[in-house]
């Protein structure tokens, strides 16, 4: 029973324990995705980031080698106050000293991952989080790979490793908890 309760608790997001990491949603990486996936990533990233703004959930942005892959897409930069991103060359965010410094400031153990690419930077970051005792949540419809096979296999492996696989809509409703609030009135039209 105790084991069940510990496991069960992991499935519930706690606003006070949650940190979002937006990984490498950059011009060069995004345009390598099929157009339908590009649109999905842009739409769902904006929804997740709006929820973060409303619930005051911190977000860390990263950019993989921006000199070659470009910067974070303008659709994200323009909706985030005081946007800044941590440059990296390691695939795992946790292998970058500047990221780790920023990450450790928040002292949160539920880490929601969005971004590109699922089978590379998302996967390696999530596995490093698990290894360090954190709970990674992978937003399946807000992460992408150039091929559907890489995306699917990475999500399967991450689930097997202990990550929680979720969706944008599940995250939003879990944060909202009920209808009729100011936050509900702002977020519900975005997910229809």
Image (tube, helix red, strand yellow):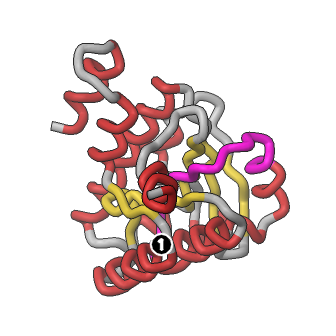
Left or right position of 126 against 38: right
Residue pictured at 34% horizontal, 28% vertical = 176
Whether residue 158 is situated above or below residue 180 in the rendered picture: below
Whether residue 121 is situated above or below residue 153 in the rendered picture: above
* Direction left: furthest residue: 192
Q: What crowding class fits label 1: few (fewer than 14 Cα within 10 Å), some (14-19), or many (20 or more)?
A: many
Whether residue 99 is situated above or below residue 48 in the rendered picture: below
Helix, strand or loop for disc 1: loop
Question: Which x, y percent locates residue 63?
Answer: 63, 60
Q: Nearer the viewer, residue 36 or 142?
A: 142
Whether residue 110 is situated above or below residue 124 in the rendered picture: above
Q: How many numbered discs, if any?
A: 1
Q: Nearer the viewer, residue 67 or 12?
A: 12
Q: Was residue 54 drawn as part of the magenta stretch in this picture?
A: no
Residue 148 in which image quadrant: bottom left
Residue 157 in which image quadrant: bottom left
Left or right position of 28 against 41: right
Question: Which x, y percent locates residue 91?
Answer: 65, 75
Residue pictured at 31% horizontal, 14% vertical = 181
**Would you say residue 59 is visible in this rendering?**
yes
Residue pictured at 47% horizontal, 49% vertical = 9
- Residue, disc 1: 117
Left or right position of 47 against 134: left
Which quadrant is the N terminus positioned in?
bottom left
Question: Which x, y percent locates residue 67?
Answer: 68, 66
Q: Was residue 109 drawn as part of the magenta stretch in this picture?
A: yes
Left or right position of 70 against 50: right
**Would you say residue 67 is visible in this rendering?**
no
Magenta region: which residues? 102-118
Question: Which x, y percent locates residue 24?
Answer: 55, 61
Residue pictured at 15% horizontal, 37% vertical = 192
């Amino acid at each position: 029973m105790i084991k069940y309760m510990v496991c069960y608790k992991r499935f519930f997001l706690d606003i006070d324990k949650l940190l979002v990491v937006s990984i490498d949603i950059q011009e060069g990486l995004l345009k390598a995705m099929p157009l339908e996936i590009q649109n999905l990533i842009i739409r769902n990233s904006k929804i997740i980031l709006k929820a973060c703004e409303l619930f005051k959930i911190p977000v860390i942005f990263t950019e993989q080698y921006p000199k070659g892959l470009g910067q974070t897409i303008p659709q994200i930069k323009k909706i985030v106050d005081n946007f800044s991103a941590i440059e990296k060359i390691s695939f795992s965010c946790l292998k970058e000293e500047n990221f780790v410094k920023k990450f450790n400031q928040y002292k949160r153990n539920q880490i929601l991952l969005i971004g590109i690419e699922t089978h590379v930077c998302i996967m390696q970051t999530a596995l490093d989080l698990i290894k360090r005792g954190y709970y990674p949540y992978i937003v399946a419809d807000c992460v992408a790979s150039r091929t559907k096979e890489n995306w699917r296999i990475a999500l399967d492996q991450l689930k097997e490793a202990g990550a929680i696989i979720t969706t944008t809509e599940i995250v939003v409703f879990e944060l909202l908890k009920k209808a009729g609030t100011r936050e509900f009135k702002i977020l519900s039209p975005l997910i229809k």
